[in-house]
Every structure is written in structure tokens, then in C-alpha cells.
Image (tube, rainbow, N blue to C red):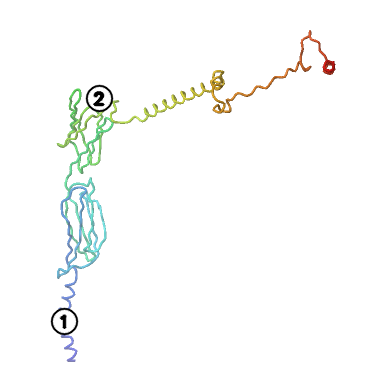
């Protein structure tokens, strides 16, 4: 009985000590480490959840990270290990205002942080084919006027009112305000100036190659060359069979004249009428061939 009481007494003394040691290892605090709290569009946010116990030692556990935009929409939701980093790149048109970073652990610990995306006003201006393209590249609405200073035969100023959502663009047709010609332009928006020199408005084209015109000229030249060449060839063919051409060939040595152009030797013609064949005049006496032979023998042996 005494031993039992002693054992029970020891347990009562040791239990608080053991419990305090074990509880010191349990996580008690979750903290988000951010690379900073203010961002411009296209910059990167990095979040590293850290979990600590009562001794301020790091503890590993799973954590869920959620990013919310100013409208309360989830833009990212990931489950990671504590002490790992989560990165998020803000888009060019990220909503300006307050964003929320929430982190939860399985032990119901959490941490909530606020970050801010700053307003960015950025307008891009370009010129092509008589049109000025204005695009809102910022993350907020743009409603400022666009000023266009025109320098040419007659200087003038064009003011265009605009209202552009982020990413939206408009086209300004200069031919509606200017006559056909070549001008120098200065486009001003938000105090930023953009110059465009020697721009063509209307049907005038500068600095560009008209491939269709070049192709048409080449076709005309090819057809003309073909007609000239074939005409010369036809003239040569006619001259080959002309008397003048053969006369020039006769003056050349026989060895230098092409075989096809050499004159053929003329064979003696046989008068068939003298041999008793063919047609004779009625006044002539037609004798048989045998009689002609007898008469020739008689005259030979006289």
C-alpha cells in the first residue's frame, strides 16, 4: 500500500513537467513573411508562411494560402508546406486598391495581411496608315483629352476626347480632319509627347514598296523581251531560205558552211522524150525504139 502511494505521488509530481515540455513543441503562432506591401502592375508578390511553437522554433505543417483582389475574387489558392514561398505576378491591368493575403493551417491557426496595388496611368500611341492608335496600358480608366499638333503646309491642333477602360484602344482617323499630304505630328497625353515625322495622310504612300506595281512592270518587260526575241528569230528563219543568204554561203569555204546549208550537187537531167518516152510535137515523126536501134547500126557499119 505504501509503494502504491509513493508511485502515485511521483506521477503527480512528474506529470506537470512532462506536459509543459510537450506543450512547448506545439505550434502556437502563424506569420506571413511578405517581400513588401505595395506593388505596381507586373511586379511580383512573395509570401512565406512561418509556423512557430512556444519556444519560437519553426514548426513544419501544411498551410493554405489565398489571395483576394479588391473585388473579393480569389486569384490564387494553394496548399504548401510552411516555410515555403508562394509567388504571384500582378498583371498589367491588376485592379488598384487593397488586396488580402490569408493563410490557414490544419491546427486552425491563421494570419491575414493587407497589400496594396498602386494606380498606374500609362497610354501608348502609335501611327499606321493614316491612323493614330491610342491604347490604355494602365490599370485604371483613362479619360484625358488627346492633343495632336500638326505641322505641314498649314499648322493646326486636333483635340480628341477619350474614355478608355484598361486595355481598351481607339483609332483616330486623321483624314477626317486633314487634307491629303505629308505632315509632322506631336501627340501629347498625360504630359508625355510622342513625335511622328513625315507621316502620309490620304492616298500618299511614303517609304513603302508597291510590290504589285513592280510585278506589273516585270511582266511587261518579260513580254516585250519575248516579242523582240521571237521577231528576230522569225527574220533569221526567212533569211536562211532566201537567195541572198545562199549567196553569202557560197562565198565561204565549204568546210565552214553548216551541212544543212550546203548546196547539193545538181544531177544531169535525162530527156525522156529523146528516149522515146513522153509527149512529142505532132510535127515530129514518132519512131519505135527498135527502128531507131536498126538505123543507128546501119549508120555505124556504112
> Which residue is the extreme one toward the top?
283
Kindly indicate the quadrant of the structure image that contains residue 211.
Answer: top left
Residue 123: x and y, percent?
Answer: 20, 39
> Tag 2's secondary structure?
strand
- Using the image, determine if residue 199 lies above or below residue 95: above
Give the label, 2 or 1, closer to the camera.
Answer: 2
Q: Report the side of 33 relative to 211 (left or right).
A: left
Q: Which mark is residue 195?
A: none
Q: Position of residue 95 (x, y in %)?
A: 21, 46
Q: Nearer the viewer, residue 86 or 269?
A: 269
Residue under the image location 32 percent in, 31 percent down: 209
Q: Locate residue 76: give its quadrant.
A: bottom left
In front here: 155 or 133?
A: 155
Residue 274 in the image: state x and y as whole percent: 76, 16
Q: Is residue 220 left or right of residue 59?
A: right
Give the mark nearest the N terminus, 2 or 1: 1
**Distance from label 2 to label 1 (Cα)?**
99 Å
Q: Label 1: which residue?
A: 14
User: Is 140 rendered above or below residue 225?
Assistant: below
The residue lying furthest to the front in this view is: 302
The residue wearing badge 2 is 181
Residue 255 pos. (x, y %): 56, 28
Residue neighbourhood size for the residue with mark 2, other residues' Cα within 10 Å, grouped as few (<14), some (14–19), many (≥20): some
Would you identify the image quadrant in which residue 48 lies? bottom left
Amino acid at each position: 500500500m505504501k509503494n502504491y502511494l509513493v508511485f502515485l505521488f511521483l506521477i503527480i509530481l512528474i506529470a506537470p513537467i512532462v506536459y509543459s515540455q510537450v506543450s512547448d513543441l506545439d505550434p502556437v503562432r502563424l506569420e506571413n513573411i511578405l517581400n513588401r506591401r505595395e506593388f505596381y502592375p507586373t511586379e511580383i508578390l512573395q509570401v512565406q508562411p512561418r509556423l512557430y511553437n512556444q519556444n519560437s522554433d519553426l514548426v513544419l505543417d501544411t498551410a493554405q494560402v489565398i489571395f483576394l483582389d479588391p473585388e473579393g475574387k480569389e486569384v490564387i489558392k494553394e496548399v504548401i508546406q510552411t516555410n515555403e514561398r508562394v509567388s504571384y505576378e500582378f498583371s498589367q491591368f491588376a485592379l488598384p486598391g487593397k488586396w488580402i493575403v490569408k493563410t490557414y493551417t490544419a491546427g486552425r491557426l491563421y494570419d491575414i495581411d493587407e497589400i496594396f496595388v498602386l494606380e498606374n496611368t500609362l497610354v501608348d500611341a502609335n501611327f499606321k496608315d493614316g491612323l493614330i492608335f491610342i491604347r490604355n496600358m494602365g490599370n485604371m480608366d483613362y479619360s484625358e483629352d488627346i492633343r495632336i499638333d500638326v505641322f505641314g503646309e498649314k499648322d493646326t491642333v486636333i483635340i480628341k476626347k477619350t474614355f478608355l477602360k484598361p486595355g481598351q484602344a481607339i483609332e483616330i482617323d486623321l483624314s477626317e480632319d486633314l487634307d491629303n499630304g505629308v505632315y509632322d505630328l506631336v501627340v501629347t497625353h498625360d504630359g508625355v509627347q510622342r513625335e511622328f515625322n513625315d507621316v502620309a495622310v490620304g492616298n500618299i504612300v511614303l517609304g513603302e514598296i508597291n510590290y504589285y506595281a513592280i510585278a506589273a512592270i516585270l511582266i511587261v518587260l518579260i513580254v516585250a523581251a519575248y516579242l523582240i526575241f521571237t521577231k528576230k528569230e522569225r527574220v533569221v528563219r526567212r533569211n536562211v531560205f532566201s537567195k541572198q543568204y545562199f549567196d553569202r554561203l557560197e562565198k565561204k569555204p565549204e568546210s565552214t558552211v553548216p551541212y544543212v546549208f550546203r548546196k547539193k550537187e545538181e544531177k544531169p537531167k535525162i530527156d525522156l522524150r529523146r528516149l522515146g518516152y513522153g509527149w512529142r510535137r505532132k510535127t515530129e515523126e514518132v519512131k519505135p525504139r527498135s527502128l531507131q536501134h536498126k538505123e543507128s547500126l546501119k549508120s555505124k557499119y556504112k
